[in-house]
Image (cartoon, rainbow, N blue to C red):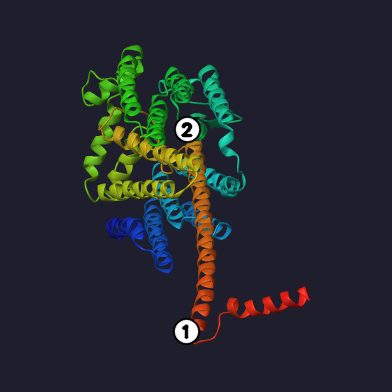
Amino acid sequence: MVNIIVELSKYLMIICIAIYTYLCFSVFGYEDEYKKRKLLRRQNRLMFAIHFMAYLVLYLKMDEVKVIAFYLIQIALLSGIILLYTKIYPKISRLVVNNMCMLLTIGFIILTRLSFQKAIKQCIIVAGSVLLSLVIPVAIRKMKKLADWTYLYAGIGLCALLLVLLLASTSGGAKLGFTIAGIGIQPSEFVKISFVFFVAGRLQKSTEFKDVVVTTIIAAIHVIILVLSTDLGAALILFVVYLIMLYVATRQPLYLMAGAAGGGVAAVAGYFLFSHVRTRVAVWRGPVSPQTPGGHQVAQSLFAIGTGSWFGMGLMQGAADKIPVATEDFVFAAIAEELGLIFALCMMLICVSCYVMFLNIAMQLRNTFYKLVALGLGTCYIFQIFLTIGGGTKFIPLTGVTLPLVSYGGSSVLSTIMMFAIIQGLYVLREDEEEIIERKKERQKSKKQAFNGRRYNDSDGRRSGRPSRAASEQPRRRAGAKKTTR
């Protein structure tokens, strides 16, 4: 009976996430707010259905009451996120909230399967992160001089990266962070946000060549410190984010081409300077070769994806726990093996729909600073997903970055939720801008109608033989003038 439930739930979850993914993109085609809300509520029901089926299987396989208790806690958390965001900020993007909750749900499911303790920690981190992020949209809305603090953003980012370079211990060949009071902190995750704000502020003020040179030098210092820390994934993310933001702000293809050429030269130099880079390139070229040290990670990831095929082995039916670093770098492979490649591809499309929404917000904002912030954060988010999935599938060399909101990691989860909250704040600003524009249009329309009404009354009076108001007042004025003369 248990095996029947496991097998049936596997297909039902795929159907549910496929419908959810379809709704993610179909929402963009609706102008009617009532129909949009109806589709978004349907997404919530599909998410909770997937959540229920997954934890039913986990409980039947693990046979532990703590799984039920943890499931109920998650229900309260996910419901709280949806209710708090929508009640406190009625103007926010419900699609972004839904997608954030859906990705968190997938993360909870696979982490419970791989490591129950890590799943509990992740749940606690998510709860704290959401509470902190609730103040961000109102801060974005109220603080009008965020664009003026460019050098503060740069100073915070550079100091944080220097601390990591000087004090952090090496883990997995890279200096990523340090531990304070038993809590691991990875500053590069938060530097991504400060970096985007710095670049947006600088490019909003000026896009002249001399100012672009100064901005490029400061941005390059960020990247160089990360390279010296051998945190190549974060360095690559900042590099690409800067190029995209610079091109959009200046509309100069030469900057884009020069940056791409410089990046190519830096990549070749990094290959010869760092053994860590050479190892990852060797793993990428031949992961199953016995002469390649560390190649078993990518090899196991590829075997897991191939074993799962389109429909997956089913939760607790595969060997996802045998994949190295499955809760972090290779979480995509674990999902593909047990939930199926279709499920994993739908998850990717949900991430893409988030990015499309971020770009939609960026294009509709009038303020250049906010427009660039939305673009930068969106690029940072989608490129990190590309690096994680591309590295795990041998499409590109492994970079060691996590899958946002899905992989285990406190700093990654907190920084990503902060990104989503900033985007929500920008969405609220966009709604405010649209309201102001609508009010101006209504005032102009009412003034025009009033003016046309007066013209109509005057012309109507002339047609009927009655003198107009101005004409009828002229004899009275003349009579009054004669009396005054006498």
Q: Observer-nearest residue: 195 or 455?
A: 455
> In the image, what residue occupies the spot 22% across and 42% down?
307
Front label number (2 vs 1): 1
Identify the image quadrant of the N terminus. bottom left
Sort mark 1 into few (<14), some (14-19) or many (20+) by Cα contacts within 10 Å: few
Q: From what the image shows, is residue 172 above or below residue 136?
A: above
Q: From what the image shows, is residue 469 above or below residue 29?
A: below
Residue of label 2: 203
Residue of label 1: 463
Q: Quadrant of residue 337?
A: top left
> In the image, what residue occupies the spot 78% across and 76% down?
486
Estimate the x, y position of residue 49 in percent, counting from the top left: 39, 61
- Residue at the extreme top of the image, as rendered: 273
Estimate the x, y position of residue 137 in percent, counting from the top left: 56, 49
Estimate the x, y position of residue 462 in percent, counting from the top left: 50, 82
Say whether residue 3 is left or right of residue 77: left
